[in-house]
């Protein structure tokens, strides 16, 4: 375990690989769309959009596994409990396998339910089913990657995390080109490419795990002992943390879905402009999440050490760097955004709407930085109940702001309420922070 004091340079050195690792996550989806756009028709694209929307609900609902594993691993590492570090990994992999197998077994009912809710044309649903069915074969390795990358981040292994996501993106893009443009497989080929890429990523991750474990002394005696590995207290704690993280994720999905619906109520032009700007925000969120991941690992280490001073230093350094980066991203959005939006949006009305509301988008990296950092602090401390409650409170504040601001201000009110949502997320967790320190002490 690293005992040297946390420094700004150390945070930056560990954060930059995570920026690229996070950027690799949406890159695969962009490749899916681009390749189908070259070869497929509108039905292909619509089918993949529907199939991906259904799968992503499942995929991101299980993302709690990455977050929970990070916190538990960092805490065990902070307390110098190497046995628990390894058992946390094994428990996470077992849980990933069980959930992945379940998703694969019920893939047909999941697809039927999803398309009953997200109705499209017959051709789009047929293509979407082909995509979802092929993609579901990759559920188990995808969730395995959640477990492994959560463990890597908990140990502060940023470079290995980048390698895993880099392999997944590279294989996915290469197979997209081969399956769709070369073999003409269409949406099913795109889903198969992603599933195979996830499997390759898991194989690489296991190889990296073996190397890391070898350097840490190898597998320790008794790791596979059923009584300790399946200890009821440890299992109950893991389930409790992960369940609350899953509920927190669902609540956040409600908030972002409400933002899309609020834009839709302002008309098609406003909806189109808001959607484009939301993609910009998503990219910046991936960048700033790198600092949140560092906050997760160091917050968990502080809990393992029972060190309030380390927790405070983690919060201060990660906040300073995230806010500074948020200012730079906001300025870049403000200065270069109009030219980029002009280049990528063909419809003149949608382009004008996006440029009009761009200033709100430019403010999000600054206002959202604290929300993301506090998320990292509480995820690392495995305070799932606090995260869940804060998310519910923030969404309620956001809905109230939307009801108050949108009727008189239109789409300006939609964006102002969305900014309030970020402030509420940070504020709700900030209100919990003294209690976190008190429990730590």
Image (spheres, rainbow, N blue to C red):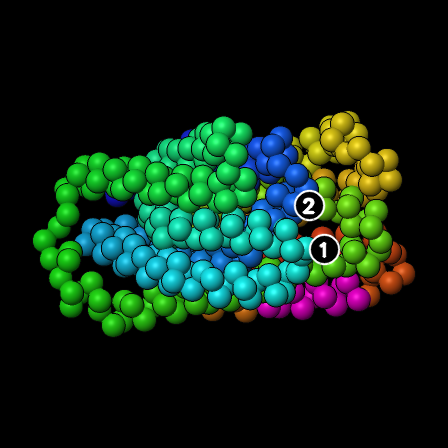
Q: Give the residue number, with chain letter if any, for mark 2.
A: 278
Counting other residues with Cα less than 10 Å from the Cα at mark 2, is it few (<14), some (14-19), or many (20 or more)? some
Query: Was residue 395 drawn as part of the magenta stretch in this picture?
Result: yes
Considering the image in quadrants, where does the C terminus appear? bottom left
Q: Is residue 27 visible?
A: no
Which element carries disc 1, helix, strand or loop? helix
First along the sequence among labels 1 and 2: 1
* Most foreground residue, 143 or 393: 143
Q: CA distance from mark 1 to mark 2?
A: 9 Å
Whether tag 1 and tag 2 are in contact, CB under 8 A, the answer is: yes
Q: Give the residue number, with chain letter if any, for mark 1.
A: 260
Q: Residue furthest right?
A: 408
- Residue at x-position 71% and y-position 57%: 259
Q: Is residue 320 left or right of residue 343?
A: left
Q: Is residue 299 left or right of residue 23?
A: left
Residue 309's x, y, as percent?
40, 51
Residue 361's x, y, as percent?
72, 43
Residue 302's x, y, as percent?
36, 53
**Tag of residue 116:** none
Considering the image in quadrants, where does the N terminus appear? top left
Residue 96's x, y, as percent?
34, 57
* Most foreground residue, 198 or 249: 198
Query: Would you say the magenta stretch is mainly helix, strand or loop?
Result: helix
* Most foreground residue, 97 or 330: 97
- Residue at x-position 50% and y-position 38%: 185
Query: Was residue 74 drawn as part of the magenta stretch in this picture?
Result: no
Q: Is residue 283 visible?
A: yes
Q: Which residues are magenta?
A: 392-403
- Residue at x-position 27% and y-position 37%: 208
Which element carries disc 2, helix, strand or loop? helix
Q: Quadrant of residue 422?
A: bottom right
């Amino acid at each position: 375990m690293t005992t040297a004091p946390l420094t700004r340079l150390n945070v930056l050195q560990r954060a930059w690989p995570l920026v690229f690792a996070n950027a690799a996550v949406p890159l695969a989806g962009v490749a899916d769309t681009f390749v189908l756009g070259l070869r497929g028709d509108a039905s292909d694209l619509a089918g993949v959009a529907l199939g991906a929307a259904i799968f992503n609900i499942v995929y991101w609902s299980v993302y709690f596994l990455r977050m929970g594993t990070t916190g538990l691993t960092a805490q065990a590492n902070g307390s110098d409990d190497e046995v628990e570090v390894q058992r946390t990994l094994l428990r996470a992999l077992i849980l990933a396998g069980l959930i992945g197998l379940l998703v694969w077994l019920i893939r047909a009912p999941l697809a039927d339910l999803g398309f009953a809710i997200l109705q499209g044309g017959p051709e789009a649903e047929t293509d979407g089913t082909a995509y979802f069915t092929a993609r579901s074969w990759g559920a188990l390795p995808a969730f395995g990657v959640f477990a492994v990358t959560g463990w890597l981040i908990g140990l502060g292994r940023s470079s290995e995390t980048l390698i895993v996501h880099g392999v997944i993106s590279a294989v996915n893009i290469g197979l997209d080109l081969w399956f769709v443009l070369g073999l003409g497989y269409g949406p099913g080929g795109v889903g198969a490419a992603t599933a195979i890429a996830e499997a390759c990523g898991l194989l690489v991750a296991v190889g990296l795990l073996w190397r890391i474990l070898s350097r840490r002394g190898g597998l320790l005696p008794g790791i596979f002992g059923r009584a300790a590995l399946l200890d009821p207290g440890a299992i109950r704690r893991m389930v409790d943390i992960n369940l609350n993280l899953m509920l927190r994720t669902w609540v956040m999905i409600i908030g972002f879905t409400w933002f899309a619906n609020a834009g839709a109520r302002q008309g098609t032009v406003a909806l189109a402009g808001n959607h484009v700007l939301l993609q910009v925000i998503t990219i910046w969120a991936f960048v700033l999440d790198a600092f949140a991941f560092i906050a997760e690992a160091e917050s968990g280490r502080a809990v393992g050490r029972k060190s309030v001073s380390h927790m405070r230093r983690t919060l201060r350094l990660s906040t300073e760097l995230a806010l500074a980066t948020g200012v730079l991203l906001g300025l870049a959005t403000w200065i270069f955004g109009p030219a980029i939006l002009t280049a990528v949006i063909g419809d003149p009305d949608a382009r004008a709407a996006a440029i009009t509301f761009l200033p709100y988008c430019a403010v999000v990296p600054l206002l959202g930085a604290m929300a993301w950092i506090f998320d990292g602090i509480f995820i690392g401390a495995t305070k799932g109940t606090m995260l869940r409650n804060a998310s519910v409170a923030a969404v309620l504040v956001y809905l109230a702001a939307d009801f108050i601001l949108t009727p008189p201000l239109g789409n300006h009110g939609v964006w102002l309420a969305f900014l309030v949502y970020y402030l509420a997320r940070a504020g709700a967790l900030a209100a919990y922070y003294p209690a976190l320190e008190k429990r730590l002490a």
